[in-house]
Amino acid sequence: MNVLQVFIEAFRSMNANRLRTALTMLGIIIGITSVVMMLAVGESAKKFISKELEILGSNLLIISPGANRTQGVRARTGTAPSLSFEDAAALNELPSLNGAAAALQGFFQITSGSDNSNNSVLGVTPEMFKVRNWKIETGSYFSDSDIRAAAKTVIIGKKVADQFFYKADPLGQFLRIDNVPFQVTGVLQGEGRSFDGGDIGDLVLVPITAARANLIRSPFPRNVHYVIAQGKSDKAMKDAETDIKEMLRDRHRIKAEQEDDFRIENLASIAEAGAKISTGLAALLGAIGAISLVVGGIGIMNIMLVSVTERTREIGIRMAIGAKPRDVLLQFLTEAVVICLVGGLIGVLLASAGAAAITSTGKIEVEIGMQAIIIACAFSSFVGIFFGFYPARRASRLLPVDCLRYE
Amino acid sequence: MSAALIALQGVTKSYFSGGVETRVLHGIDVQVPRGDFVAVMGQSGSGKSTLMNILGCLDQASAGSYLLNGVDTLSLSRAELATIRNRTIGFVFQSFNLIKRMSVAENVALPLIYAGVSRAKAHQKALSELERVGLKDFARRLPNQLSGGQQQRVAIARALVADPPLILADEQTGNLDTQTSVDIMRSLQQLNSERGITILLVTHEPDIAAYAKRLVRLKDGRVLYDGPAAEGLRQLAASHTETVGQP
């Protein structure tokens, strides 16, 4: 008996009992929908994180000064002037880090001709570009001499360039930041929201020394607002954190029993925390999927057993005219597998609809990959074989003489 | 010996239920040469259905030997028995036993499908077999759209499709009216005489048995008579008048 014939007969007998087949399939449909959705959501969450991290620069640690204490009252984190250029420079040399870059941040009015806007301005060192994975599209990076000379140069994001210079070449033009003229020497590549709420396109970067000298004046001229450090690899982040902590405690002469006067945050872990919600959702879907596949499988086993009993006489006829036990086994097994596969296919279609619905909310892009479809097919075939085997074997072990007597 | 299509020797069959042995057949010795046309008669409980099941390889004897076409069936596996049924025996049942969901042509083709013949070839052969029984135009119908006599002719076509040397018929006219029974019996006779197919049928009606060449009568699991049909039926009629016809 050839494969095609076996499949034709399976479809025929499914068609003979349409309502029953549909109800039997339901468990598998729900199960496969959930499993495929789980895979798709999980995959999308992973993609989302890696995209965020790409924008952010990967393996980043952000070190901010600790809180200022005045008469026992703890103020906002970052208010204490406890991080300096020298700390950043020392951290930059740590072997467990790719680099460390200091930054000053302020909010200023930027003008050029009649255009003006209020924008966040970052004072950075050349290391910042490497650490944050920022690339120059046109122009050049800050040089060490820019830093030494506190050169009034500025590197801007694409959006800023479009806003102030529209289609003209911004290089060599001047932007007035807080009324101080800065010459544009570079435009950054790319745009897009990054996890810390910023957009590469909105960035306005100046040498950190120029920011200190012209924009963000302070009684503590060596202090910086934060330092961003990049670990060597995502596995070595804990070590990097420990090294930074040790070095800074040592440099700040903090006694063993004293609290740190700085804070270290892992930006990736913040991004991951955001993605945990989607991972949690995926796990929930997976659990629903697993349960409904098992319940659906039991349903299939149940219906196949009924079907075998119902068709005892038919089994007898088939055996009488030459069906071997193996042929009967194959027939019922195929029927169970086909029910599962069709259910699985419907499940994949439903999951695609679900994915499209989620994507249309605009929060996260969910896509059903080829991998998810293959896994769905494999799962449903497995359920069909696993739960269809017992009824099929039972059918194949019936004796023809008993079957033909069965009314 | 080897010329015989069917050779039964000392065949017994016992059933066990609740630890009690019920012996249905007590040592049957029957030889059926090729081309014979045998009617098996007996009252219910005589063991004729059990004998038919054993002959049809649907059931196996408890003891004795059964050579079918020279093959000892007692030593065969279930799969091997299935192959024997497929190649050697065509079944015609009292209740037709067609598969309701399949068209007439598909029903007829099914033995060939199980024999591994391609769908196209099996369909072709099924159509030519249906043509012989005059039902080619009904090939696409479902069995229950046909009359009883037509269904039984479809069953005969199915029994013949794989060209078996032997047809086993079990009360094949039991559900049919007289005229249809006559038609069916004539066509079986024709098969026997024209195609040389050996036919063995079980019946309790002397009218039906009269179409056969040879009669085997069973009683309580033993062969009571084995000889020419005409003589056997005369004896049967006589015994009937003796027992039933007495005033």
Image (cartoon, rainbow, N blue to C red):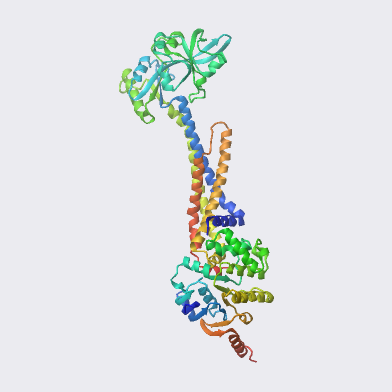
Seen in the picture, residue A8 relative to B202 is either above or below; the reply is above
Compared across the picture, whether B100 is left or right of A200 comes to right
Q: Quadrant of residue A318?
A: bottom right
Q: Residue visible at 48% across and 58% down?
A: A390
Q: Is residue B77 left or right of residue A19?
A: left
Residue for point 51% across, 51% down:
A295
Q: Residue furthest right?
A: B179
Give whichever of B166, A210 is nearer the camera: B166
Q: Is residue B136 above or below residue A185?
A: below
Residue B150 placement (x, y as % from top left): 66, 69
Vertical position of residue B53 compared to residue A296: above or below:
below
**Residue A1, x across and y down, in percent:** 52, 59
Name the residue rendered at 62%, 67% in the picture: B129
* Position of residue A110 measured from the top left corner of the image (x, y, whole percent): 53, 12
* Horizontal and vertical percent position of residue B60: 48, 73
- Residue B15 shows in the view: no
